[in-house]
Amino acid sequence: MKHPKNKNQNISYKLKGEALYGVHACFAALENGIRQFFSIFVTQKYHADVVKKDYGCPVNIVTGEQLSKLIGDDAVHQGIVIDSRPLPEKSLEEVIEDSSEDSSLLVLDQVTDPHNIGAILRSCAVFGIDALVLTERHSPKVTGVLAKIASGALEKIPLVYVGNMVQALNQMKKSGYWISGLAEEGDQFAHQVKFDGKTALVMGAEGSGLRRMTRETCDMLVKLPTSDTFSTLNVSNAAAIILYEAHRQKLYQTS
């Protein structure tokens, strides 16, 4: 099938779904067999790469300036924008049902910044997390910004939104997950904890940290070995460190 294309048109197009932009985010989406698309907009540079496969939607050749007008001047599109249908949502029940004996989940308790979520998704993909669990309220939905920062990881790591964090954690416990919350007041350092079997790591928002009920529902609280003079980390950086430690232990079966 030859895709229709319009070169250097004045875009009067109105986005119907999620606007994905940026090379890594868009080509990862195109390679995801689950994704469905409304339309693809590319500069001449990427046209040949896109039309190699039929994605069931129009492919439009446009200029970089037209792409900026389509999604906003602040968005770094890198020459490609996709109007995509949202990915199918996955429930916590489905994630648990599909889990293995060494499954790992990351849980975020009201982390609101899409840049942080995108960066955390990349770490989740790198360190073998099965799903990222977020609260329905006070958590960002999928946007082009989040997808671009995630650099393709959005296509690999399911986002699972839950209405009640405490109920979700208790549901994980009943399914065999050991719940570890990351907090400065933790009793043990992360490297002192044995992360094996089903593991759920819980992190709170920057500044406020874990909410009281979330903290009390965790099986244990752990902390990172930080400097006495400056102990505060960006939540995405802290997530990368704790995910690395948990993955390292499972990978090498350390005690």
Image: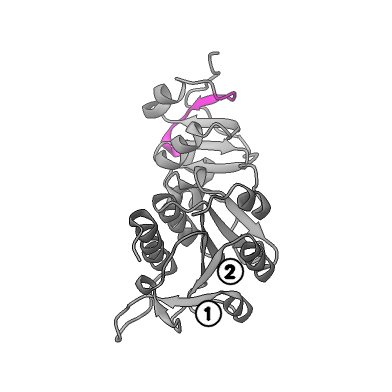
Callout 1–callout 2 Cβ contact below 8 Å: yes
Q: Secondary structure at mark 2?
A: loop
Specify the amino acid type for callout 2. Answer: Gln
Residue at screen point 52% across, 25% down: 59
Residue at screen point 46% across, 59% down: 115
Tell me the number on the disc at residue 208: 1
Q: Is residue 197 left or right of residue 97?
A: left
Tell me which segment is drawn in magenta: 55-66
Q: Position of residue 86 (x, y in %)?
A: 62, 42
What is the quadrant of residue 247 in the picture?
bottom left
Residue at screen point 59% across, 78% down: 211
Q: Secondary structure at mark 1?
A: loop
What is the quadrant of residue 37 in the picture?
top right
Q: Which residue is mark 2?
A: 110
Q: Residues within 10 Å of mark 1 (few under 14, many from 20)?
A: few
Instruction: Tell me, yes or no, whether the highlighted magenta stretch contains residue 63.
Output: yes
Q: Residues within 10 Å of mark 2 (few under 14, many from 20)?
A: many
Q: Nearer the viewer, residue 174 or 243?
A: 174
